[in-house]
Image (spheres, rainbow, N blue to C red):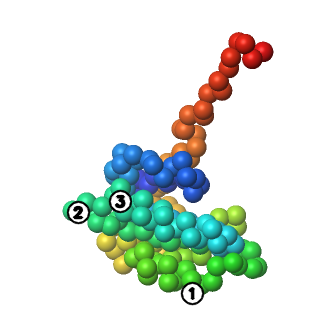
Amino acid sequence: MKIKVQLWDIAGQERYALLTRSFYMYARGCIIMFDLNNPDSFENVRKWKQVLDKNTADEVYAPIPCLLVANKLDLPQRAVTDSQVEEMCRELSCVQWTPVSVKEGIHVNEAVTYLLDVILGRSPRSYTQSEFEIIDHIHLADFVEQPKKKTCKACH
């Protein structure tokens, strides 16, 4: 079985909050990631989950499964506690939450695998990387037009 996975890294930037429904059209699952050492990043999870639900809810997929991912597990101190994350996960009806370290590669594959299992309606289990193919990793920042500088000949 091949599974096409597209990861859209929007880096939590405000300019992506207004993405059109077309960016969400085929989404069947979502990972919302925040920084364990940044309370503002954690609080923004609510906003991103609302945007996600608003743009993906329909009669078939309402709401799509969302995995809450707490990044920077590798750092010794945290500004956000496990109990806060657990409460947020329940409040927002996320399927689960997991701590990861993207920098160290800790639990990243397991998080994606878990979400894929949920999407496919299977009991989550461990997979090897070769059992599914990650096809695309897209950074939206690569596709956003930068504002053009206004120039005036009289300003030279």
Q: Is residue 112 left or right of residue 153?
A: left
Q: What's the CA distance linking mark 3 and mark 1?
A: 27 Å
Q: Quadrant of the C terminus?
A: top right
**Residue projecting furthest to the top:** 153
Q: Position of residue 47 (x, y in %)?
A: 48, 64
Q: Position of residue 94 (x, y in %)?
A: 42, 74
| Marked residue nearer the N-terminal end (3 or 1) | 3
Neighbours of disc 3 within 10 Å: few (<14), some (14-19), many (20+) = some
| Marked residue nearer the N-terminal end (1 or 2) | 2
Q: Nearer the viewer, residue 53 or 137?
A: 53
Residue beneath disc 3: 54
Residue kind at label 2, given as amino acid type: Val
Q: What's the CA distance linking mark 3 and mark 2?
A: 14 Å
Q: Is residue 23 left or right of residue 47?
A: left
Q: What's the CA distance linking mark 1 and mark 2?
A: 32 Å
When the figure is inspected, residue 133 is found, relative to residue 125, above or below; the finding is above
Residue drawn at the location 63% of the way across and 68% of the way down: 40
The tag on residue 83 is 1
The tag on residue 143 is none
Residue drawn at the location 31% of the way across and 71% of the way down: 121
Residue beneath disc 2: 60
Q: Quadrant of the N terminus?
A: bottom left
| Marked residue nearer the N-terminal end (3 or 2) | 3
Q: Position of residue 83 (x, y in %)?
A: 57, 87
